[in-house]
Image (cartoon, rainbow, N blue to C red):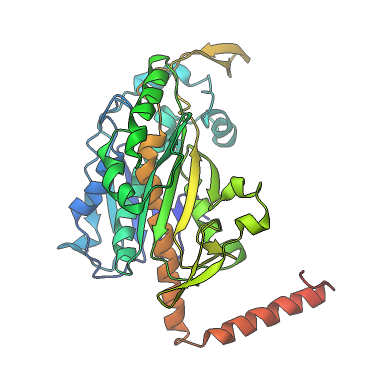
Amino acid sequence: MNPFEFGEKFRIEVSGSSHGPSVGVRIGGCPAGIEVNESDIQLQLDHRKPGQSLLTTQRVEEDKVVIESGIENGATTGGEISMHVKNKNVIAAHYSSMQNTPRPGHADFPAKVKYGPTDLSGGGFFSGRMTAAFVMAGAVAKKIIGKSGIETMAFARQIGSVSVQRDVSESEIRQNTYSNPVHTAAAESVEKMVTEVESARRDGDSVGGVIECRILGVPAGRGEPMFRSIESVVSQAMFAIPAVKGMEFGSGFAGSTLRGSQNNDGYALEDGKVVTTTNNCGGILGGLSTGMPIIFRVAIKPTSSIYTPQHTVDLQTMKPAMLSIKGRHDPCIAIRAVPVVENLAAVCIADMMLLEDEGKKRLGERNGNEDRERMQEKWEKRADERNWKGA
């Protein structure tokens, strides 16, 4: 399987590198007639764009989307969509002295072991710059799922040691997230988060963060069990973001400290619709959507490229060395990762919805009971072969 591809129906393929000519994405499986234009894609890219403040990298890139195919006259054609952004502000000299000294926190060392002598200037295809492709694809995916009333949104729940401790409403996320330099939805936390990042930047260091994402409007019963669960698919996608080091859904790790009576979500009726009284499951049970908002959080590590001297080794002399990294780097990459998480979540849901809709058509809207019966028969047959029944 191509490691630069993701999705089954809504398929994306990422290309380029941090210091190459461009970063691009190709999208297959997008239906014709989806209304999307250059400004829709550019809006999402602008949320991620570097060089917008001292809290992000000073590598100023225009990141203007170039649509090559698949979108004409403000709508998708049904053919392959191809688009890219150009890399215009590249200074490879910043990396020339680090070819034999792997940077702590980066993929330099394992990549050299696997691929041999390779120019990883700017991080190559391991760079966070590759996430521009995720955002371009997500801008299209947002339009697809939007037709079904589904929306993805995200915000910085935590920056460094400063976290938002209260519940945040969806309206706050929509209104506040991209109107402040740290991309948080809680207006009262902005100043403290800014101070946290500025302190690390002055010290030649960096901080990480936690991003919360919500997916609204997914009807109950979507998704698949086991290896195709919503959690499995979303997690696979999120770990393609280079700085992601952790994932949790709903109550997540905190839920492990609760009792079942505290963590279980009771059911109730609301306007004739089944809902849960709480949402500790994060909108997912058994890999399937419950109809409640899907909520997950990703942990973003501190930016690996820091100006503080660090220990490494010289791979030519095989002796210890000290490394002082040059270049332009984000003191907190979590800030610009917010739109990446939001858009990549849209890619996951678009793929899931299109795949399931295609399956329904292919089966001629066959009664779901038949599918369940066949799945149960298959499970029991496998259990009998192993002489056990799943508890």
207 displayed left or right of 86: right
The spot of residue 382 in percent (x, y) is 75, 75
Image position of 187 with respect to 4: above or below: above
Q: For residue 93, which quarter of the picture?
A: top left
Between residue 130 and residue 170, name the one nearer to us: 170
Most extreme residue toward the right is: 387
356 displayed left or right of 372: left
The spot of residue 344 in percent (x, y) is 40, 52
Image position of 6 with respect to 341: above or below: below
Between residue 54 and residue 185, name the one nearer to us: 185
The spot of residue 108 in percent (x, y) is 52, 29
Residue at 28% over, 41% down: 178
Residue at 22% over, 53% down: 40
Q: Is residue 12 visible?
A: no
Most extreme residue toward the left is: 73
The spot of residue 347 in percent (x, y) is 39, 57
Residue at 64% over, 79% down: 375
Between residue 251 and residue 218, name the one nearer to us: 251
Q: For residue 262, which quarter of the picture?
A: bottom right
